[in-house]
Image (cartoon, grey):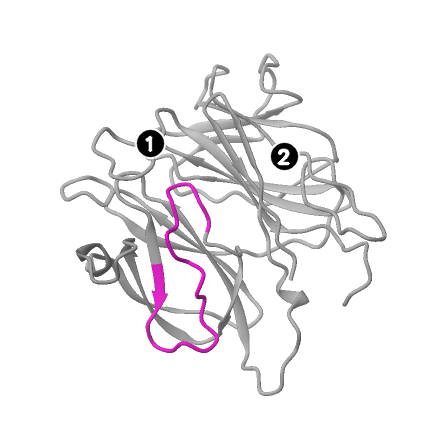
């Protein structure tokens, strides 16, 4: 099981990369059909959250606990029995008897299909009277074939940011010119994967029709592999498949981590091919 995660901080930027390769899981007798699920917290005005699959313990994610705003559940994609699954999302508390663990944000049943990958994007506001109200957005992650360069997509989860254009420039300080990669992107839009040559780049988010960046986020470079170490995905590593998600700032009444400006976080959807022998 391959897992990698690191952070890149800059001006209005948060970057994180992580991925578990479900294909690396050993095959066990009597294993049911599996889907692969991850949870990303895009709710800016409450505590960290915990996801519990409450229909069964076996073949259910157990690492989606205490997930902070702008973070992904530990382990990224987790194997999950493929069928209709009952789950709840709670505000997190370290005290299992505390009210925080009984504050149910989402109570739903979702159907997962065998062999498919899903992102559960928890989007919206949790505080009463705030709009849009928090909810789970289920994204079917149709991963492309391993690219010759990299594959990159974007998701707009920036509440109150408005429609945006997304550009790619070599660094976070280059002048923005030309045609955006993605134009007039609305909230909750999931772009297609775009092929790119390997090489450093920064996502530059502007208001639709503008060339003034409101967020500038350098993509993680990644790490080349060797005969003894597998590669880690990034802009410079061929075969990487990554997603950038735009998040809002946290409001003044936020009970969780505070972010004074909007930001972008990068997530690994699939690591590059291994360079070490399979165990």
2 within the magenta span? no
117 relative to 260 in the view: left or right:
right
**Magenta span dominant secondary structure:** loop
Count residues near mark 2 (Cα–Cα under 10 Å), then give few for <14, some for 14-19, many for 20+.
many
Residue 270 place in picture, x, y as percent: 64, 52
Write down the quadrant of residue 25 in the picture.
Answer: bottom right
Residue 226 place in picture, x, y as percent: 83, 48
**Numbered disc 2: secondary structure:** loop
Where is mark 2, residue-wise? 220
Residue 115, relative to residue 223: is it above or below? below
Count residues near mark 1 (Cα–Cα under 10 Å), then give few for <14, some for 14-19, many for 20+.
some
62 within the magenta span? yes
Question: Which is nearer the N-term, disc 1 or disc 2?
Answer: 2
Seen from the viewer's position, the closer of residues 194 and 239 is 239
Locate the C terminus by quadrant.
bottom right
18 relative to 230 in the view: left or right:
left
- Residue at x 53%, y 59% (from the top left corner): 77
Residue 169 place in picture, x, y as percent: 63, 22
Magenta-drawn segment: 51-72
- Residue at x 19%, y 43% (from the top left corner): 127
Seen from the viewer's position, the closer of residues 259 and 83 is 259
């Amino acid at each position: 099981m391959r897992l990698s995660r690191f952070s890149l901080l800059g001006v209005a930027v948060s970057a994180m990369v992580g991925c578990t390769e479900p294909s690396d899981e050993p095959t066990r007798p009597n294993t049911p059909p599996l889907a692969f699920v991850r949870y990303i917290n895009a709710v800016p005005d409450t505590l960290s959250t915990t996801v519990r699959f409450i229909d069964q313990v076996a073949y259910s994610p157990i690492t989606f606990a205490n997930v902070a705003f702008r973070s992904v559940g530990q382990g990224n994609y987790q194997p999950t029995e493929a069928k209709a699954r009952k789950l709840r999302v709670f505000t997190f508390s370290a005290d299992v008897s505390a009210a925080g663990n009984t504050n149910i944000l989402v109570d739903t049943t979702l159907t997962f299909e065998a062999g498919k990958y899903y992102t559960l994007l928890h989007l919206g506001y949790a505080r009463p009277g705030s709009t849009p109200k928090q909810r789970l957005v289920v994204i079917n992650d149709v991963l492309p074939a391993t690219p010759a360069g990299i594959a990159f997509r974007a998701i707009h989860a920036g509440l109150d940011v408005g429609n945006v254009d997304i550009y790619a420039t070599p660094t976070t300080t280059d002048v923005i010119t030309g045609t955006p990669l993605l134009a007039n992107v609305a909230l909750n839009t999931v772009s297609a994967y775009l092929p790119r040559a390997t090489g450093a780049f920064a996502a530059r988010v502007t208001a639709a029709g503008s060339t003034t960046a409101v967020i500038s986020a350098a993509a993680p470079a990644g790490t080349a592999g060797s005969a003894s170490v597998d590669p880690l995905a990034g802009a410079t590593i061929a075969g990487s498949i990554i997603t950038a998600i735009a998040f809002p700032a946290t409001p003044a009444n936020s009970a969780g981590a505070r972010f004074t400006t909007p930001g972008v976080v990068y997530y690994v959807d699939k690591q590059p091919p291994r360079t070490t022998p399979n165990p």
